[in-house]
Image: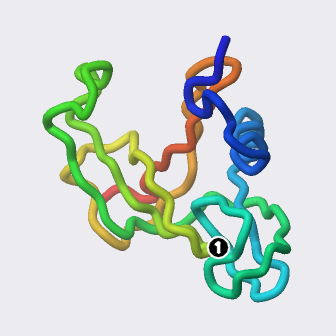
């Protein structure tokens, strides 16, 4: 089955990230020279222009930086999921990560709430990183 999340794995970075997701591992690049943890993936650090980086494992925790509740599906395949929450999570490692918050009512979500990663296993090849609230109001 072709990986629909990363269909053509344009580069090694995308392939490595996608393979880590299949193992329930959220990874990012950290600049070897300035320590900036970056997302999206790139071959050069946006802060210092270094091309040296290492992969680091995210602890999968952070807080809701911003969010929107979709009452009309973005795509027809999401019709059975409305309303759903799309959020920007500020991870403890630094990156802001666009994802979904699941396992709660949209009215329970507020900016600043603590979240942790959960995985949606779509298939044997696709595992999506999503987040849940650590404490419900």
- Relative to residue 132, is residue 50 depicted above or below? below
Which residue is nearer to you in this view: 81 or 27?
27
Residue 65 lies left or right of residue 8; in this view the side is left
Q: Position of residue 72 (x, y in %)?
A: 14, 34
- Residue, x 30% and y 25% (percent of image)? 78
Figure label count: 1
Quadrant of the image occupied by residue 133: bottom left
- Relative to residue 8, is residue 113 depicted above or below? below
- Relative to residue 58, is residue 52 depicted above or below? below
Which residue is nearer to you in this view: 116 or 122?
122
Coloring scheme used: rainbow
Which residue is nearer to you in this view: 127 or 113?
127
Please tell me whether mark 1 sits on a helix, a strand or a loop: loop
**The C terminus lies in quadrant:** bottom left
Residue that badge 1 annotates: 93
Quadrant of the image occupied by residue 49: bottom right
Residue 75 lies left or right of residue 90; in this view the side is left
**Local crowd size for mark 1, using a 10 Å CA cut-off: few (<14), some (14–19), many (≥20):** some
- Residue, x 42% and y 59% (percent of image)? 135
Q: Position of residue 103 (x, y in %)?
A: 39, 40
- Residue, x 74% and y 50% (percent of image)? 13
- Residue, x 55% and y 31% (percent of image)? 120
Q: Position of residue 4 (x, y in %)?
A: 56, 24
Residue 109 lies left or right of residue 88; in this view the side is left
Residue found farthest to the top: 1
Q: Position of residue 24 (x, y in %)?
A: 71, 40
């Amino acid at each position: 089955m072709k990986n629909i999340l990363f269909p053509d794995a344009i580069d090694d970075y995308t392939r490595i990230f996608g393979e880590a997701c299949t193992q329930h591992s959220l990874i990012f690049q950290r600049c070897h020279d300035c320590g900036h943890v970056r997302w999206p993936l790139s071959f050069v650090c946006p802060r210092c222009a270094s091309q040296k980086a290492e992969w680091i494992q995210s602890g999968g925790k952070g807080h809701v930086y911003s969010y929107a509740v979709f009452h009309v599906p973005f795509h027809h395949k999401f019709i059975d999921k409305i309303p759903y929450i799309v959020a920007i999570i500020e991870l403890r490692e630094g990156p802001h990560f666009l994802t979904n918050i699941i396992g709660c009512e949209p009215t329970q979500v507020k900016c600043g709430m603590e979240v942790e990663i959960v995985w949606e296993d779509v298939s044997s090849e696709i595992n999506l990183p999503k987040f849940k609230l650590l404490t419900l109001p």
